[in-house]
Amino acid sequence: MTEEKKSRYTEAQAKAARKYLKETVEDIKIRVPKGQKAVIKAHADRQQESMNQFVIRAINETMERDR
């Protein structure tokens, strides 16, 4: 018999988190050449950022420069 995986959150907490994310953020999916993801992650790690933080910063800095 298998045990159900216990969640760290109650269903109400999970629902609230989904609602919050739906109301506050949007997802963008990008595709990179094979191997590039590891290069991006390594760079972000060296900058002490998540990949998400790095990509957002790179986009914002590029848009500011292009003005």
Image (spheres, rainbow, N blue to C red):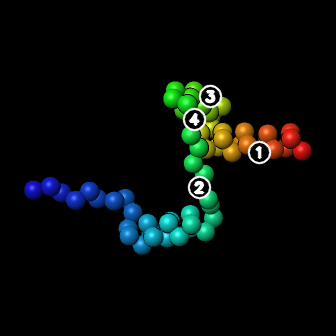
The picture quadrant where one finds residue 39 is: top right
Residue at horizontal 15 percent and vertical 55 percent from the top: 2
Q: Pointer 1: residues within 10 angstroms few (<14), some, or many (20+)?
A: few
- Type of amino acid under label 3: His
* Image position, residue 64 (x, y; %): 85, 44
Q: Is residue 8 above or below residue 32?
A: below
Residues at marks 3 and 2 touching, judged by CB atoms closer than 8 Å = no
From the image, tell me which residue sits under label 4.
32
* N-terminal label among 4 and 3: 4
Q: Pointer 3: residues within 10 angstroms few (<14), some, or many (20+)?
A: some
- Type of amino acid under label 2: Asp
Gap between marks 4 and 3 measured at Cα: 15 Å
Residue at horizontal 38 percent and vertical 68 percent from the top: 10
Gap between marks 1 and 4 measured at Cα: 19 Å
From the image, tell me which residue sits under label 3.
43
Helix, strand or loop for disc 4? loop
